[in-house]
Amino acid sequence: MSSFLKKIFGTIIEKPWEAERAQVDDAHSGQTFDLSVQKSAVIIIFGIATVLFSLIFTGYIYSVPPEQDTKYLLKPNLLWINTFILFIISFYFNKVTNELKKSEVTNVKKNLLVIGGLSYLFLFGQVAFWIQLMKSGNYVQTNNYFSSFYIFTALHGLHLLGGLLFWGKVASRVLKTKSEKILDEEKNISALSMYWTFLLVVWLAFFLMIYVFNDAFIEWCKTLVA
C-alpha cells in the first residue's frame, strides 16, 4: 500500500513535457500502475465510500446544536472489543499476503476462515451494541449524536457485508483449490486485504472522533456552530 502511494505521488510530480522524461515514457509498455482489475475496483469503491463517510462526518459536525447534552452518551467496552477485532483481522490479512508472497500456502485456507469468522463476530458485536443502546433508551431520534452514530455504524456494517460477499467467493474457491494452485488467487486476496484496511482506517477515524474524544469533539463542534 505504501509503495502504491509513493508511485501515485511520484507520477504527479513527473514532467512529461521534458525530453528526458519523454524518453523514459516511450520506453515503457504503457501501463502506468501495476494494478490488477480487483485492486482497481477496490480503489473505485474507496473513492465512493470516502465521499459517503465524509458527508456523515461533516453532517455530524454541523448538526450538533450548542445545547447538545452529552450526559446520555454510553461508553461500554464493546466498541473497544470490536476495534480490537478489526486490528486482528488486518493482522491475519497481512499474514496471508506474506504467506502467498513466500509461496507458503499451507496456512492460507485456515487463516482465511479465521478472517471470515472474526468479521462475522464484528458484525454480531455491532448488533449487540445497537440492542444495548436501545435498551438504555437511546434511539436514532434521541439526539444528533445517536442519529449520526446509528447511520455511520449501519453504513460501515453494509460495507463490511459487501466485503464478506467477496470474501465468501474467494474463500470458497481457495478451499476447493489444490495447494499448488492457491497462488492463482493472490490478486483477489490482496484486493480483499486492501478493502479491510480501508474499513479499519474509516472505523478508527469514527471511533476516535465520535467515541474516544467525543466530549472534546462536541465542544469543538459547538464553537464551529456558535
Image (tube, helix red, strand yellow):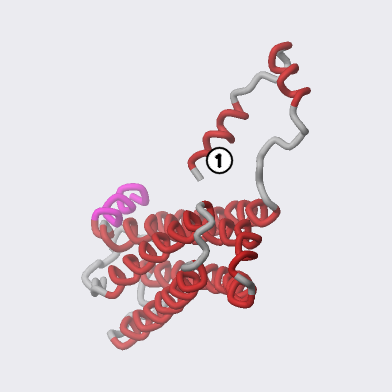
Amino acid carrying mark 1 in the image: Phe
Vertical order, 39 against 152 (above or below): above
**Res 181 → quadrant:** bottom right
Q: Which residues are magenta?
A: 216-226
Q: Residues within 10 Å of mark 1 (few under 14, many from 20)?
A: few
Give residue 103's position: percent from left, percent from top: 54, 56
Residue that sits furthest to the front in the current view? 180
Q: Is residue 98 magenta?
A: no
Vertical order, 97 against 17 (above or below): below
User: Mainly helix, strand or loop, the magenta region?
Assistant: helix
Q: Nearer the viewer, residue 44 or 106?
A: 106
Q: Nearer the viewer, residue 88 or 218?
A: 88
Horizontally, residue 106 falls left or right of residue 18, namely: left
Residue that sits furthest to the left in the current view? 71
Q: Nearer the viewer, residue 42 or 102?
A: 102
**Res 90 → quadrant:** bottom left
Give residue 37's position: percent from left, percent from top: 70, 54
Q: Residue at x 37, y 72 (%)?
A: 146
Vertical order, 23 against 186 (above or below): above
Whether residue 56 can be seen here = no
Give residue 50's position: percent from left, percent from top: 54, 54
Q: Nearer the viewer, residue 17 or 147?
A: 17
Q: Residue at x 29, y 50 (%)?
A: 220
Which residue is denoted by mark 1 in the rendering?
4
Whether residue 193 can be seen here = yes
Q: Residue at x 74, y 24 (%)?
A: 25
Q: Residue at x 24, y 73 (%)?
A: 77
Horizontally, residue 80 falls left or right of residue 130, namely: left
State the SS at label 1: helix
